[in-house]
Image (cartoon, coloured by chain):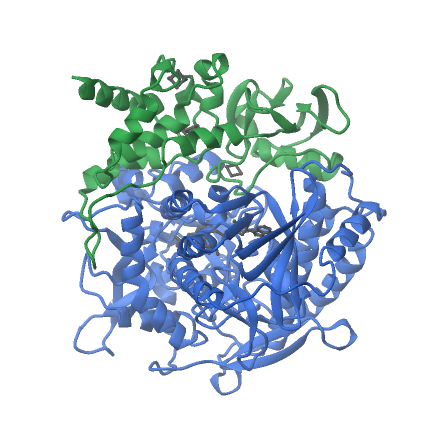
Amino acid sequence: MEVTFKILRYNPEKDKEPHYEQYRFEAHENMTVLDCLHKIKWEHDGSLAFRRSCAHGVCGSDGMRINGKNHLACSTLLKDLNTKDTITIEPLPSMPIVKDLILDMTDFYEKYYAVKPYLINKSPVPPDSERLQSNEDAEKLFESAKCILCACCTTSCPSTWSNDNYIGPAALLKAYRFVFDTRDDAADERLDIIDTPDGIWRCHTIFNCIESCPKEINITWHISQLKKELSNREL
Amino acid sequence: MIHKFDVVIVGAGGAGLRAAVEIPKGYSCAVISKVFPTRSHTGTAQGGVCAALSNEEDDSWLNHAFDTVKGSDYLGDQDAIEIMCQDAPRAIIELEHMGMPFSRTKEGKIAQRKFGGHTKPEDPNDPNSRRLPVQRACYSADRTGHVMLQTLYENCIKNNVNFFSEYYLTDLIIEDGTCKGLIALDMATSEIHTFHAKAVMFATGGYGRVYRITSNAHVGTGDGCALVYQAGLPLEDMEFYQFHPTGLWRLGILVSEAARGEGGILRNSANEPFMEVYAPTVKDLAPRDMVSRAIISEIRAGRGILGSDGTYYINLDLTHLGKKVIDEKIPEITGFARTYLGVEPTKESVPIQPTAHYAMGGIPTNYDTEVLYDNKGKTVTGFYAAGECACVSVHGGNRLGTNSLLDIVVFGRRGGKKIAEFLETAKQIDFNSDPSEKTKEKLTNLLSQSGNEKTAVIRRELQQNMMDKCGIFRNETDLTEMKQLIMQYKERYNNITVQDKSSVFNTDLVETIELANMLDIAESINDGALNRKESRGAHMREDFPKREDEKWMKHTFIWKDGSGGNPRIDYKPVIKTRFEPMERKY
Ligand SMILES: Cc1cc2nc3c(=O)[nH]c(=O)nc-3n(C[C@H](O)[C@H](O)[C@H](O)COP(=O)(O)OP(=O)(O)OC[C@H]3O[C@@H](n4cnc5c(N)ncnc54)[C@H](O)[C@@H]3O)c2cc1C
Ligand code: SF4
Ligand code: SF4
Ligand code: FES
């Protein structure tokens, strides 16, 4: 079958503004959007720039806007899209474009670093063995630990769109990952960090983030657990 | 721009990050990576990381070492293997202490499961009794590599490690037998950076992308190994490349051995569980090289299943595991089957085919990760390598599943320690001349050369032919043909036009440099394979089907600088401690 891709292109050395370019080519319904981008790059226009690595939805490199929805190019198959119409590919919204589909993700990473995304444990560890943790407690972390930092959620969030400083769902999810780890001793420090005007309270439970998460993480549930924890703390 | 650091590590996968964590605070350390650290390939590892923790059943590091030596088909160096297996429990416990989330046992210890080639004697008092599968692989559902990489990166953030993300290594500077630093391209701007360092570590990962069907990420192009080869240093055992038996058909995306560890069974077109014939005791949990060959043998014997595109596959049957095991123990990989093949693993078999997976060979090092200058044991001052790019050699002719995640943390740490020791007295030595000139010239040439060749076309031909002629089964005719082909590709390379001339994220240019590296890697694999006239581990010569210990129980060292544009080959003896070679039956 023939498909048409309309891609938002931008080369800072040539273009004043981003603009769309169209590509029509032969494709198969089992191809992913990433396969198609490669086809365009490898057969038509070598200058098309995008990030990618694993090609199966685990490295988080290729989050982009596909027909208006945030998703990973490598996990979106043509058969899941309406290929009769033009397929529109744009970079994720609300981050500065560097070139074509490549964004400057500095701000996204800064917010992730802000929640102290590492285990802080103040008690001595057993010398020759692991700390014990029930499988139940461990599994409470697994959902949040699945995150691949693709930024699909944060850039789909209306609160992010209206306020650049909002910490965003990805960072909140990371905060959950450590606040609820039975081995961690810095829950309070992290809760202080997110309990700010640009922190967790900007989340109005609008669910956009969940819909765009390629790992199908129930982000809002995790955020609500953090909100509960904060309310309990105040009581 | 010139940077000065005490140590520069190239690679932000498990090996590079583990080494970075080990560098004492008093020394300046930079980590360079062509992708953002958490996007490194380690994150795709699924099944587990092994250690004889005995959390589920009695086990010992000696059992683990025995399996690793046997799995390596007696090409692994036993001193290094003993170090790794003995250090394994400590290494895993350390990861737990760093915060890695593991699946747990009822008592709250780290959970363990079975994996291919990991066994223990049925009678604990008789090491020669029949060996049965043992639960040795520690895991976090089927996202073990992902959480390991996250945890190591998190510890680097905690330690304020300097990262240079999306910097692409283009040259290694070795002058007078000493490594003085490296050159990297800032992909966002095309600016060339010189890193002047007292110590350099390569942790640049594998090169599965030289094959068409592979489980490896697009970035797995073997840059580090190729630069070492181009610098006139040897590579070791390059002919040993592992095909994992279960890649998703057509795509090569990995279905971890964990699927068989949890009870999955391979079946042919007659629905027969054929591994019973090839490995009667461990069956589907035989080592990878054997299972991959069994699959191809079944297909060749007409017992494959014909796919819609005219190629054949084998079925991986998980239906009897039940929804609970599938959803809790292997959710990610069964998700891949749903997404990419539209198969529901709780109800239907998953179509699979062997996929290029792991490089046993690489940059030769001793067990302290010091890079070898030659096959006599001399080392390159200030140069270290660890992880998949290195050949210690703990995996010999064939790696056991879950031994690589172990290798990267054990030897990443050892490397970090050795570097710290070296830095106590090391000095920064001036360059003889501006070392960035070579890279500048190379880039200018690539951007100005013109012709009607395309990077992607040559790359695709290389990948397909490596698959067909230098893959699971090999023979003199195919390998000789492949050698000619690689020479032709190298000539055609000079007629490539790089379409993108821009300096911002010129990924067209980077892919073209990667292709040059892949061509060198393919050459070293193929020449090694042509030269080794025996079959051992993953290297199977149809024309020399037997293992020949007298003649060939030795490591291949290959240099680029032979006569007439040919590589040169020499050997290094295998180090034996306590395990005598025997026939490899399972
Ligand atoms: C799908 C899959 C599943 C696996 N599952 C398991 C498992 O369950 N258990 C197990 O033990 N092993 C497993 N393995 C193997 C194991 O994951 C890898 O061998 C291991 O993670 C390699 O780690 P590394 O640190 O050496 O390299 P990598 O993680 O590959 O990292 C390489 C690093 O080098 C950088 N780099 C490379 N070239 C350049 C350059 N030119 N410039 C700058 N930076 C560069 C990259 O950016 C990256 O940061 C699996 C492998 C695959 C492919
Ligand atoms: S639920 Fe919260 S974080 Fe998610 S999109 Fe809505 S406002 Fe944003
Ligand atoms: S939570 Fe989901 S969408 Fe958000 S960064 Fe993580 S994986 Fe991506
Ligand atoms: S390329 Fe890794 S997530 Fe898509």
Q: Position of residue B445 (x, y in %)?
A: 81, 51
Determine the residue located farthest toward the bottom in the rendered image: B550
| Residue situated in front as seen by the camera: B78 or B459 | B78
Name the residue located 60 percent from the left edge and 53 percent from the top edge: B221
Q: Which chain is depicted blue?
A: B
Q: Is residue B294 visible?
A: yes
Number of numbered discs on residues: 0
Is A187 rendered above or below residue B65? above
Q: Position of residue B491 (x, y in %)?
A: 80, 59
Determine the residue located farthest toward the left in the rendered image: B107
B426 left or right of B470 in image: left
Name the residue located 17 percent from the left edge and 73 percent from the top edge: B123
Q: Colour of chain A?
A: green
The N terminus of chain A appears in which quarter of the rendering?
A: top right
| Residue situated in front as seen by the camera: B60 or B334 | B60
Q: Position of residue B443 (x, y in %)?
A: 76, 49
